[in-house]
Amino acid sequence: MFLNKKYIVPDNIEIIFDDNMYKIITTKDLLPNEKIFDSQGYLIDNNIITQFYNIQIYNKTKLETITVNTIDHAIYINKDKYLHIIDSFMNHSCNPNTYIITKPINMNNKTIKYESIYAKFFIKKGTELTYNYLLFEYDSHYNTFECNCNSNNCCKIYKGFKYLDKKIQLKLLANLNSYVLDEYLNDKLNN
């Protein structure tokens, strides 16, 4: 089980606690399309709304115990809920500086989801890394928050892809993960 494992933060990033939240910052300049790190996802029970886990992370030179939960740190992939450890500390932006490629890998007759996180454009050392939660969550149900990214396409109140303005939805369609796309298409067919 993933709880018995120690996670090593890659050298090119650091997890920090600032402004009452965890953030991932880059420890070096990143080039466009440069792979930043890989993250393994662990399948968790879809029926559990909130569950807390204490995990151990080697963050540069120190071992930290950090609490993660299934609301803030899990995403849906093909209707399955996965808890990703390192990238779960990346915060949302409607105009993120990273993109994520998700790929399933069969290991011991179980499908495990790996995510590779890439720089969308040049990112200067010390910059917070962000990704767009809307591409991975159709309806956030329990995890709504005020978005302060101030981008032109800012959702203002984050509730999930389902609640976005239709024009913004159309702009994001090509980048959605398969779960969000399926939910969107099902809504379109049934309404």
Image (tube, helix red, strand yellow):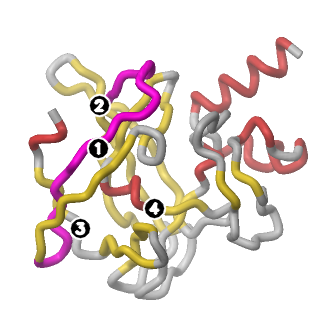
Does dot 1 land on a helix, a strand or a loop?
Answer: strand
Magenta stretch bounds:
43-61
Q: Residue 111 sits in which quadrant?
A: top left
Which residue is tagged 4?
90
Question: What is the x, y in percent for residue 118?
Answer: 45, 62
Q: Amino acid at mark 1?
A: Gln
Residue labelled with disc 2: 112
Q: CA distance from mark 1 to mark 4?
A: 14 Å
Q: Residues within 10 Å of mark 2 (few under 14, many from 20)?
A: some
Q: Is the residue under label 2 in contact with that under label 1 (CB below 8 Å)?
A: yes
Circle 4 — which element? Answer: loop
Return the x and y of residue 171 as percentages of the image width and height: 80, 49
Nearer the N terminus, badge 1 or badge 4? 1
In the displayed structure, 174 sits above or below 191; it is: below
Q: At 67% from the left edge and 30% from the top edge, which residue is drawn? A: 181
On residue 10, which mark appears?
3
Q: Earlier in the sequence, mark 1 or mark 2?
A: 1
